[in-house]
Image (cartoon, helix red, strand yellow):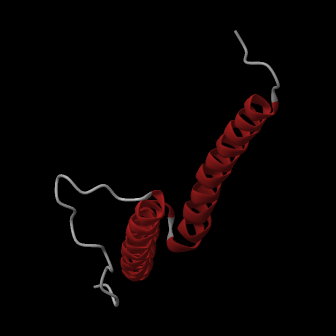
Amino acid sequence: MLDTQANLAPPTTEGEDLSLIEDVRLLAGEARTYAQAELAYQKARAAYAGAETRNIAILGVGAAVLVFFAVMALVLGAVIAVGTIIGPWLSMIAVPVAILVAAAIMGLSARGKVRRMMSLLREKEPAE
C-alpha cells in the first residue's frame, strides 16, 4: 500500500534520553508516514466513490428508461380502455388532457413549495 518504508529510529532503552532534535526528527518521520498513509487512504476512497457513482448513474438511467416505458404502456392502455367508452378519437384527446392537468397541478404545487422554501431560507432571523 505504501511505497516507502518508515525510517523510524530504534526504540530507546529505559535509561536513554533522546535529545530535542532527535525527538523532532522522530516526530517528523512519523508525521510523514501518517501523511502518506492518509493520502493513500483518501485516494482509495475517491477511486471507490468514482466507480460507485458511475454504477449508480447507469442503474438510475436504466430505471428511469424502464419507468418511462411503463408509463407509456399505462397511457396507451388508458387510451384503449377509455376508447371503448367514448370512442378512440375522443379518448386520444381526453387521456393526454387529463395527464396534463395532473402534471399542471403537480407543477404548481412544486412551485409553491419552492417559493415557500426560498422565502424561509432568505430570512435573516428564524421565525418563531
**Please, is residue 8 above or below residue 22 in the view?**
below
Q: Quadrant of residue 123?
A: top right
Identity of the residue drawn at 44% across and 62% down? 82
Is residue 54 in view? yes
> Residue 99: image x %, image y %?
57, 58
View extreme (front): residue: 15
Figure quadrant of residue 125: top right
Q: Residue 72 sits in which quadrant?
A: bottom left
Q: Position of residue 30 (x, y in %)?
A: 38, 67
Q: Position of residue 34 (x, y in %)?
A: 38, 68
Residue furthest to the top: 128
Quarter of the image with the N terminus is bottom left
Name which residue lies at 39% across and 66% down. 26
Q: Residue extending furthest left?
A: 14
Going 58% across and 55% down the picture, which residue do you hit? Answer: 98
The residue lying toward the viewer, choosing from 42 and 2, is: 2
The answer to whether any part of residue 73 appears in the image is: no
Q: In terms of depth relative to the viewer, which is nearer, 126 or 116?
A: 126
The x, y position of residue 81, in whole percent, is: 38, 65
Q: Is residue 119 above or below residue 98?
A: above
